Amino acid sequence: MGSCPKLKETPQVKNIQREDIHIISRHSNLTEEKVAKTLKDSVYNDKEAWEKFLRLFFISLGVGFTVSGIVFFFAYNWQDLHKFTKIGLTEGVLITAAILTLLPKINDNIKNIILTGVSVLVGVTFAVFGQIYQTGANAYDLFLAWTVFVTLWVLMSNFAPLWLLYLVLINTTFILYSQQVAKDWLEVFICTLLFVINVGVLISATLFVKKKIPHWFLNTVALAATSYATIGIVIGIFDKYQAAFPILILITVIVFALGMWHGLKTKSGFYLSVIPFSLIIIVSALLIKISDQEMMLLLVSLFIIASVTLTIKNLINIQKKWANEK
């Protein structure tokens, strides 16, 4: 096979991985110098990429430490501050940070990072107000108001970390509502609703959002959804019969089947590992429900060891198969 002409134009190569270059080099007459140059131009991060990463990293770190410092400042000096000073300081910092995001000379990524910090300060402001006027700093309506008041910023920025914060607020609000208001809701029903909410966000982000979404965000949402399904089914196995239990099982079977199909289609090992591990936990709980004698516990231990080993072995084989297909 002759040399690959496309690799000579390294600036135009898109989405090429290190494994692709090594596979091509084994089946062509490319020299080591050309392979090294291609890796340097198309795979390795250059000085500019590292500078951009470090700049955003330290800005994010600075914003995070600033917000943490404000929180600890109020926690340490709470008794010595007047109530108007408490509200004034939080509102002043919040307004100042919000104004910074409106400056045209600031980079969009930096604006989004600052906006994420401002969104956290919104919660701090509500918490300070709740502590002063005893409205309940841990009540679900605090998180509900927090969620509502940052919604516009989340939609405008379309920034993955801010979306993750927003999703955490939604889940927290729902859980606190079920604990403080809807006390008659059973655990399986709560897990079912949380599972549906997070799966809905995951499907919407995967299918309907045109902007490229970071894999870590999708994986985090998928992990949360899988956790809710696993917890709900395990509770349903050990607890008395709940009406939502068959519904949760049906939805879980459909979603897990779609997740496995999506993992095979997109060559994502994440779905092919998280879903089997969830099933291992569910089957182990079912076996313990059948019997909690010593022999059953030994059988469950052997089952976990064998199933985890088999899952890892299959993942390795699938990864090798995908590498050979490139």
Image (spheres, rainbow, N blue to C red):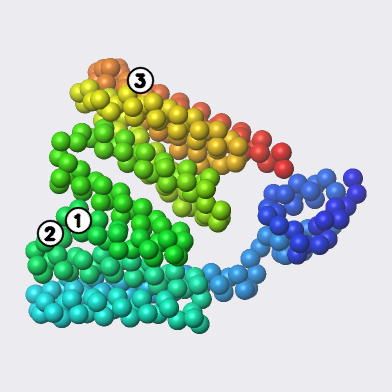
Residue 217 horizontal side relative to residue 175, left or right = right
- Residue drawn at point x = 72 percent, y = 49 percent: 20
The number of callouts visible is 3
Mark pair 2, 3: CA separation: 48 Å
Mark pair 2, 1: CA separation: 9 Å
Question: Which residue does the numbered mark 1 point to in the structure image?
Answer: 141
| Mark 2–mark 1 CB contact (< 8 Å) | yes
Task: Determine which of the numbered discs, if any, sits on residue 299 in the image.
Answer: 3
The amino acid type, in three-letter code, at marker 3 is Leu
- Residue drawn at point x = 25 percent, y = 74 percent: 70
> Measured along the vertical axis of the image, is residue 61 above or below residue 296?
below
Residue 11 horizontal side relative to residue 1, left or right = left
Question: Could you say whether the residue bearing mark 2 is in a helix, strand or loop?
Answer: loop
The amino acid type, in three-letter code, at marker 1 is Asp
Task: Determine which of the numbered discs, if any, sits on residue 136 in the image.
Answer: 2
Mark pair 3, 1: CA separation: 47 Å
The amino acid type, in three-letter code, at marker 2 is Gly
Question: Could you say whether the residue bearing mark 3 is in a helix, strand or loop?
Answer: helix
Q: In which quarter of the image is residue 84?
A: bottom left
